[in-house]
Image (cartoon, rainbow, N blue to C red):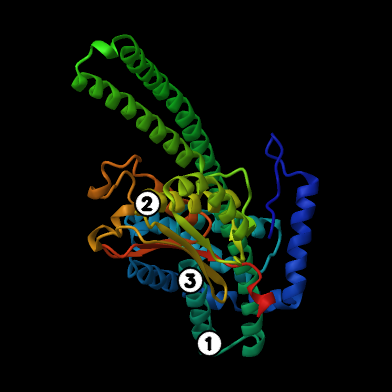
Amino acid sequence: MAEMPKTDESGAVSPRADELSRIDRNRRLAFLDLDAADAEVLRSVKSLFEAQADQFVDRFYDHLRSFSETAPFLNNPDRVERLKRLQREHLESMLEAHWDDDYVRRRWRVGHAHADVGVEPLFFLGGYIQYVQYCFQVFTAAKNQPVQGYDWALALLKAIFLDVGLTLDAYFDQSTRSLQHALDMLWKANEELRRFAQLTTHDLKTPLATVANLCDEAIDEFGADMPADARDLIVAARQATFRMSTMIDELLAAALSAQSIEAEGIVSSESAVQEAVERVRPVLRKKGITLTVAPSLPQVWGNHARLREAVFNLLSNAAKFVDPQEGKIDVTVDVQDDTCVIGICDNGPGIPAEERERIFVPFRRLPAHRDQPGSGLGLYFTKSLIEQQGGSVWVESEPGRGSRFYLLLRRFGAAETE
């Protein structure tokens, strides 16, 4: 990519930067085989274009007004006249063929300007096409051509390729800078959000802990003298504070999950699933739930911590709702060409059709599960964690026949195993 000359604090171009610019320009000219002979050819036909340049520019801007993407930039008559003048100067300078540092800087400014206002390359590249067509019409119609048609056509195309290359380099340079600036702002905003989340959770959990302690003290000191209904209300209040504290922890986890400390890469899905299984195993033993896991799980692309948490959420969710008398959970795998699908299937009560999509909405809980502990965030987190690593989550279920949650993941090593 061409690099614009860098200036010092006084605005002067540094000798080193000017040298780099000159080297890049000479490299482009050599690559296009654009030389002094081409420059002479272009200058010889310049007067042919100048005679009808205003007509071409007027026609070109009429063409721009016919597109919704470019028409909004042409509402101001004074601006249009200025743009027309600059357009004519730009096109004529290609036929002047003075490929010096000033020529490069002017093309660089054009590319930057289009990127700044949001005009896509499609539209200003269309201007070059119109220019080529018009020059061919004008030059071929001329009765006294100073050079052969092949010579001026080839020289013109070389000059346009030089111009397009410089302008596009500048356009993408500016677009990259704008994108980097936006990413920097996003990163700073996320950092502030995470700090806010951490401070807020602390501020929220402290009074909750105080309320829970006061409930304990009330029961310890006056429980024996309290009416049973009053004692139950205090116990319920205490449990509510614990649920709220858990919800705050989960919200903090969601705020921090956007940037994991582990980079995305090759992940052993078998290892992630086994770690999730070990965390949920005490609940499975307590409730007598049978768990089976597919014997061989593939390596995938993603993030180990996110995959482990997603599987744990689904396993613990299944364990929460299956019948403890005959509860059963199966972890399955379906390996495809470049993806794999891990399934967590249970024989629980199932999910009504009208609720299947809404269960991934934060704080959404099935009416039948309102008396169960939980915040309604588990499935929302699962979906977010998997989508952050390029996967997807969905559910298949019907009332009375259990639920089957599926994680679609990008598989590693597909090409090597074919």
Q: In the displayed structure, does residue 151 sit left or right of residue 111? A: right
Q: Secondary structure at mark 1?
A: loop
For discs 2 and 3, the disc positioned in front in the rendered view? 2
Please tell me which residue is depicted at 60% across the width and 63% down the height of the picture: 300
> Which dot marks residue 324?
2
Residue type at mark 3 is Gly
Q: Which residue is mark 1?
A: 142
Q: Is residue 308 above or below residue 123?
A: above
Front residue of 363 and 226 = 226
| Label 1, label 3: how far apart the Cα atoms are | 23 Å
Quarter that holds the N terminus: bottom right
Disc 3 packing (10 Å; few <14; some 14–19; many ≥20): some
User: Residue 135's x, y, as percent?
Assistant: 52, 80
- Mark 2 or 3, nearer chain start: 3
Q: Which mark is residue 127?
A: 3
Is the C-beta separation of discs 1 and 2 under 8 Å?
no
Three-letter code, disc 1: Ala
